Image (spheres, rainbow, N blue to C red):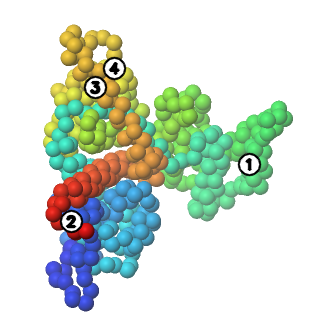
């Protein structure tokens, strides 16, 4: 059941409200008055039942999600920090200062799952539309990056050890007595994997690796025989795939709890491979506003990500970009749904001087998306995704881009207020100065 709003509509002469206490020029207070909270409540109303216990207000949950991404915090941290910050409470719709936690941190998990991709995309669209005409650029920059998943670096021995642990846990859960648990043996083999650089240590580690794989196969086969038909069939099939895969196979499993993770080789000197999912971003060429962020489960060629990314940009801001600046990784069609695709290349160049200068400026402007991607990864939780599943990949990138747009709006507003104060200070009449 959807909850009502917090506003009481009256003030107390004993305790002033947050509206009376807070600075009316503070960017977060101005953001609270500009955000379309009513549209969020209307869009998410169908996700709630008409009966039952009232849920947390939509404005509270949306503001917590945005504050978490804007300040690069976890679910537990943002809830704890919310109690300490009156501006955050005012942004969430409270009129009086609160001393208790607004919700349980797990409520954020359930709310993200409830709104899904459509709800996160609505927040991204609202953050872009907050900039007004600045988001309506005819020229955008499109690029792809990898959103890394929160998994350990995949190594065969690690995966095989995880298979053994899962099998032992599954046998205990189902009450199955294993012919041999291998707990002591696996503990010794773990130490043998920590080899040195000598030939004897390397050979001992290699034997331990093969032994661990053999034990994992035995446990999987034993569970397959003793479990009822069809019970935990998907898990056992996943374990078999991990044990059967080879070095140069395609569609390999890199994590047991995130089997959809893909491997990407982006040619970086400091990081040869990245494990996660591909993301396509559409950013204004001059404003830097992110108008679209599309997440892909498969490792697609960059050119195939353009239609979905440009369609999302058109849905978010109501206007399709006319020109998209891309790098050479997008080789392919020069037109995608009415959008001209421009990439650095030797031919064909315009014959007139003005056309050549325009093309050079476009190619130089294309690299402006690179620092934007870097800030998304370092400041807005795109560098490592902690949300589970394919839906978690999509929601995290959309919320990160929405938070980036909001932080940019706050910076622009702060700069405008500072310029206004300087202008007022410099325009003071000399006659008003005190006489000496």
Q: Which residue is mark 2?
A: 433
Q: Which residue is mark 1?
A: 190
Q: Which label sits in the foreground, 4 or 1?
A: 4
Q: Residue at x 27, y 11 (%)?
A: 348
Q: Give the x, y percent position of residue 327.
A: 35, 25
Q: Which residue is mark 3?
A: 362
- Sooner in the amino-acid sequence: mark 4 or mark 3: 4
Left or right: where 10 falls relative to 118: left
Q: Residue at x 55, y 30 (%)?
A: 269
- CB-based contact (under 8 Å), mark 4 and mark 3: no
- Sooner in the amino-acid sequence: mark 3 or mark 2: 3
Q: Give the x, y percent position of residue 132.
A: 17, 48
Distance from label 3 to label 2 (Cα)?
51 Å
Distance from label 2 to label 1 (Cα)?
80 Å
Left or right: where 330 falls relative to 162: left
Q: Which label sits in the foreground, 2 or 1?
A: 2
Q: Which label sits in the foreground, 3 or 1?
A: 3
Q: Which residue is mark 4?
A: 344
Considering depth in this image, is 208 or 178 the residue closer to the camera? 208
Distance from label 4 to label 1 (Cα)?
51 Å
Q: Quadrant of residue 319?
A: top left
Distance from label 3 to label 1 (Cα)?
55 Å
């Amino acid at each position: 059941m959807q909850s009502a709003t917090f506003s009481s509509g009256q003030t107390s002469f004993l305790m002033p409200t947050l509206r009376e206490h807070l600075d009316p020029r503070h960017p977060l207070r101005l953001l609270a008055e500009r955000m379309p909270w009513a549209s969020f409540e209307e869009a998410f109303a169908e996700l709630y039942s008409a009966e039952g216990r009232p849920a947390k207000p939509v404005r509270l949950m949306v503001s917590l999600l945005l504050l978490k991404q804007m300040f690069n915090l976890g679910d537990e941290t943002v809830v704890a920090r919310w109690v300490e910050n009156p501006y955050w409470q005012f942004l969430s719709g409270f009129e009086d200062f609160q001393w208790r936690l607004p919700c349980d941190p797990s409520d954020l998990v359930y709310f993200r799952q409830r709104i899904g991709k459509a709800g996160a995309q609505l927040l991204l669209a609202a953050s872009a539309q907050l900039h007004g005409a600045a988001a309506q650029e005819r020229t955008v920059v499109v690029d792809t990056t990898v959103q890394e998943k929160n998994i350990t670096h995949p190594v065969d021995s690690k995966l095989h050890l995880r298979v053994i642990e899962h099998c032992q846990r599954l046998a205990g859960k189902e009450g199955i007595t294993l012919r041999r648990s291998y707990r002591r043996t696996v503990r010794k083999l773990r130490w043998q994997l920590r080899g040195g650089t000598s030939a004897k240590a390397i050979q001992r580690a290699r034997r331990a690796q093969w032994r661990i794989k053999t034990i994992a196969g035995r446990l999987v086969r034993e569970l397959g025989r003793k479990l009822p038909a069809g019970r935990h069939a998907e898990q056992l099939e996943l374990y078999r795939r991990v044990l059967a895969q080879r070095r140069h196979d395609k569609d390999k499993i890199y994590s047991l709890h995130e089997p959809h993770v893909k491997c990407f080789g982006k040619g970086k000197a400091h990081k040869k491979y990245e494990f996660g999912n591909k993301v396509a971003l559409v950013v204004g060429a001059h404003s830097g506003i992110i108008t679209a962020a599309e997440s892909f489960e498969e490792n697609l060629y960059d050119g195939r990500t353009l239609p979905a990314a440009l369609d999302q940009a058109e849905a978010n801001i109501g206007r399709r970009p006319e020109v998209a600046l891309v790098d050479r990784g997008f080789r392919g069609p020069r037109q995608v749904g009415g959008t001209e695709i421009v990439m650095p290349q030797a031919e064909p160049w315009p014959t007139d001087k003005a056309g050549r200068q325009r093309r050079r400026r476009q190619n130089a402007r294309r690299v402006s998306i690179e620092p934007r991607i870097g800030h998304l990864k370092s400041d807005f939780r795109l560098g490592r995704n902690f949300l589970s599943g394919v839906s978690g990949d999509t929601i995290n990138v959309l919320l990160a881009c929405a938070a980036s747009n909001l932080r940019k709006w706050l910076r622009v507003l702060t700069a405008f207020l500072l310029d206004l104060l300087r202008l007022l200070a410099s325009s003071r009449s000399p006659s008003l100065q005190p006489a000496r």
